[in-house]
Amino acid sequence: MSRWSARGHLVGGYGLPVLALLLFLAFSLALPDTFPTRDNVSAILSNQAIPALLALGATVPIATGRFDLSLGYGLGLAHVVVLLLIVDTATPWPLACLAVIAGGGLAGAVNGFIVEFARIDSFIATLGTGSIMYALTGWLTGGGRIMPGPQGLPSSFTALYDAEFLGLPLPAFYVLAATAVLWVVLERLPFGRYLYVIGSNSRAAAVLGIPTRRYSVAAFATSGLFTGGCGVLLAAQQQIGNPSVGLDYLLPAFVGALLGSTTVTPGRANAPGTLVAVAVLAVGLAGIGQLGADFWATPLFNGATLLVAVGLAGYAARRRLRVRPTADGPSSPADGPPRPPVHQPPAHP
């Protein structure tokens, strides 16, 4: 590897974590009394836990080259159903949470079946199912909010979001645990490597004998499980059911997942990269908010970052293809799963 290639790899792999640190230092210097405080850090970790988990869920289908646009709609439906089960039917909250998480996985599997077996583009398919979820949310709530009774929600349920562990918000540990598990699954287990092969070249994956449809459906189901879990946390945080709140989380989730594919392992979706990207967004949004920016600054920041993320993700993917060794040559672990060997026809004498 040349000196310039090595420098480019370092910038691509570690530039975003350095940017997160620089942003934190810049806002700490600009707001020394409020930004570099324990309360502010705890607030950032707590407020960004749900977007981080949703972004991790979006990462899995992106690894296969698919996109799940139903995440925000599913989040809204999941948190409403949790509250309906607890408030209206007096279902024990652990059972209600398990039911919603399982339902999220089922909804994700339905998305996968529509994409893979009906042969509908993932953008269109998941946008359609998301609209159906949004309609179902409106039907269940009648367009209004779900309010708990005078006794409120069980304290053990709200503690899922409000509790602390080792002096930090408990949701932050959910994010760290989910990132670690997803890293192991994607980087160290055959399941994740198959997803990357499918995302790189689905036809080659089929030639290798990988059941591409089955793994793609599993990727969408995993995304649905994350969405259901985020719905549970959102219900514990909000403690009321708002049928439209989930849409606010869709754009940050995709920004985090796409921007994360440009770092740590540039050129492909990966869990640590998603976590770093969410950290950049969290620090940036917190700093902008404390500087007194207008309400439109947040969607402007998210939209501009999404455009940058898509551009950088495409550049990283193209660069990775340019520097990838030939199919018959050696490859390094950083290059991801090997492609199938290319057999040239014998030359005629």
Image (cartoon, helix red, strand yellow):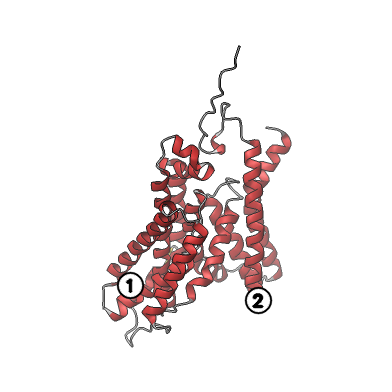
Residue 227, x across and y down, in percent: 43, 63
- In the rendered image, the vertical position of residue 293 relative to residue 44, given as above or below: below
The number of numbered badges drawn on the structure is 2
Viewer-side residue, 305 vs 159? 305
Residue 136, x across and y down, in percent: 39, 74
Earlier residue among tags 1 and 2: 1
Name the outermost residue toward the top: 349
Q: Secondary structure at mark 1?
A: helix
Q: CA distance from mark 1 to mark 2?
A: 36 Å
Viewer-side residue, 50 vs 126? 126
Residue named by callout 1: 156
- In the rendered image, the vertical position of residue 349 relative to residue 90, given as above or below: above
Residue type for callout 1: Ser
Q: Within 10 angstroms of label 1, few (less than 14), some, or many (20 or more) residues?
A: few
- Where on the picture, by quarter, is residue 25? bottom right
- Where on the picture, by quarter, is residue 318? top right
Name the outermost residue toward the bottom: 150
Q: Within 10 angstroms of label 2, few (less than 14), some, or many (20 or more) residues?
A: few
- In the rendered image, the vertical position of residue 118 relative to residue 300, given as above or below: above
The quarter of the rendered structure image containing the C terminus is top right
Disc number lying in front (1 or 2): 2
Residue 294 visible: yes
User: Residue at 73% across / 38% down in the picture?
Assistant: 4
Residue 108, x across and y down, in percent: 40, 59
Q: Secondary structure at mark 2?
A: loop
Asked whether, in this view, residue 9 is left or right of residue 134, the answer is right
User: Residue at 52% across / 59% down in the picture?
Assistant: 123
Residue 194, x across and y down, in percent: 45, 41
Viewer-side residue, 292 vs 246? 246
Residue named by callout 2: 296
